[in-house]
Image: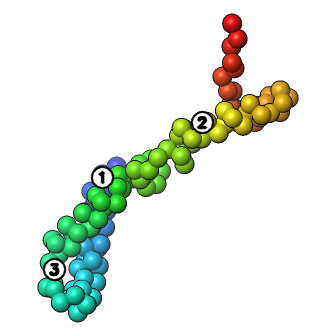
Amino acid sequence: MKRKFRFLFILAPIAFISLGSLITMGLWNWLVPVLFKVGTITFLQAAGILILARILSGAKGFHRHGRMHFAHAGSCHPHGPFRKAWMHNHCEELTPEQREKFAERFGYHPKENKEA
């Protein structure tokens, strides 16, 4: 069973790149020469265009759970700096009872300001 998954792990990216390159090559050779009076491209040039677009868009690749991870600020990340600041400010506005209920429900315990 593991052998099958290893084979698919190697074959799937090659298949996706090949399919994407064929689609890019077909669209380019269909539209661009007519619109801009330039030449057609080969399969390898189409693959190069896809790789260049991926680099320029800032895509880093797939991470856990198959989600794409882009090179943006940590604002949407659950542990990003903006989310932490929002949570801290939100908890400061709560009454002690609301804060305890919130902490029990979500497991969040903001650092208490220790007065010396």
> For the point 60% across and 41% down, which residue is it?
83
Residue 8 visible at all? no
Q: Is residue 33 left or right of residue 107?
A: left
For residue 93, above or below residue 29? above
Residue 78 visible at all? yes
Residue 49 image offset from top left, x and y in percent: 23, 69
For residue 36, above or below residue 23? below
- Residue type, label 3: Ile
Q: Check if mark 1's residue and mark 2's residue have beta carbons within 8 Å.
A: no
Residue 6: mark in rendering: 1
Q: Quadrant of residue 11?
A: bottom left
Q: Check if mark 3's residue and mark 2's residue have beta carbons within 8 Å.
A: no
Q: Which residue extends farthest front? A: 116
Quickly name the residue at label 3. 41
Quickly name the residue at label 2. 84
Q: Mark 1 to mark 2: distance in Å?
A: 39 Å
Element at badge 3? loop
Q: Check if mark 1's residue and mark 3's residue have beta carbons within 8 Å.
A: no
